Amino acid sequence: MASVATHFSGFLFLFPVGIRRLLFSSSLYLKSPSNFRSKLWYFSHPAWKNIDLYFLLVALPIASFSEFVIFLSFSGHPTYRFAFSLQSIALLIFWVLILLILAQEYLGSSLVNESFVFIFGSICFLVEYSVFGKGIGGLGGVVYGFLGALTLVCVGACLYLSVKPTAFFADFLLSSGLIFKGTWLLQAGFSLYTDAFMLKGCKKISLSSPSLENVDVHCDLDEDSLRGITLMHFIFTVHATVVLVLSLGLFGLLASNRKLRCVEARGPLLTELESPQMLMHALPGQEME
């Protein structure tokens, strides 16, 4: 996580996935709340509409390889060499998660258990949690600390869904957590690694010649650093408010307008569940005849 580009790439991965999951899970829940069951991935039909999943399937190993190359070529502090290697491993583990999701979808639960994949997903987030902000303290550590807290929210949601996949609030929390992680990752990139968005009296983090064990945003005065920490707490609160309004707003729009719901979220499971209900409605009429 050493540049704006890597943070922006993370935003492009997380934000669309979170929005998509929120739309599809909410559509599925609103269609039949009592029959809701969370899915590892809300597949669309036809298959080409799942382009985002296949994009991740190709992009994650490329990103992992890129991080590994940086790890081999980086000549700075050993702390950052280690951090780049961990990031490479984390991306590779998420790629394995995508493979498990595809295997569960196409091979069935008899070979790949859905609860196991949710548990594996929580492990992926835990590995990611161990990577964020490695070797960075002070103001930078505060920013990455918030990112780590959001990651733990995703860990908890995945673990809960592995035990109770019918819990919509856990799926809603996971979706919102992914959206929040995406927006905050972008914020961290701009706030820590650019001069244009850097806090007053402070300079961006530079890894070109690290000389300390815990590198931080360099501020001229302690007051500048304390003001920056306070401001980042406020910005985090603003992000939380915006994400909450966005998530509840999308849910409200879907609840008030059926045409906006993602029809692909119905799936074969609801079809099977709705069949007995349709038969029950049809039986009285047949008996009257």
Image (spheres, rainbow, N blue to C red):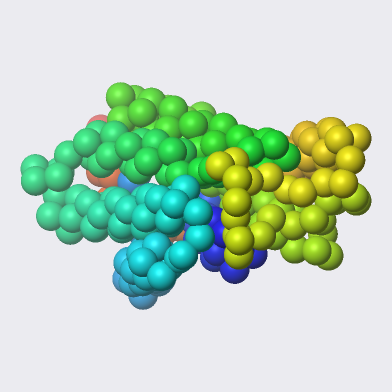
* Position of the C terminus by quadrant: top left
The image quadrant that residue 221 belongs to is top right
Picture coordinates of residue 253, whole percent (x, y)? 68, 48
Q: Residue at x 82, y 59 (%)?
A: 197
Report the side of 167 relative to 189 (left or right). Answer: left
Instruction: Please tell me whether residue 12 is drawn above or below residue 37 in the rendered image.
Output: below
In the rendered image, residue 125, in percent from the top left (x then y), is placed at 41, 40
Left or right side of 75 for 64: left
Residue at x 83% of width, y 65% of height: 196
Residue 59 seen in the current view: no
In this view, the residue farthest toward the left is 110
What residue is at 44 percent from the left and 28 percent from the top?
156
Q: Residue 237 lies in what quarter of the image?
A: top right
The residue lying furthest to the front in this view is: 211
| Relative side of 167 to 257, left or right | left
Residue 170: where, in percent of width, then height? Answer: 47, 30
Residue 13 visible in the current orientation: yes
Give the image location of residue 68, x and y in percent: 35, 64
Quadrant the N terminus occupies: bottom right
Q: Is residue 126 above or below residue 194?
A: above
Q: Nearer the viewer, residue 92 or 244?
A: 92
Q: Residue furthest bottom?
A: 48
Who's the residue at 42% across and 33% down the image?
155
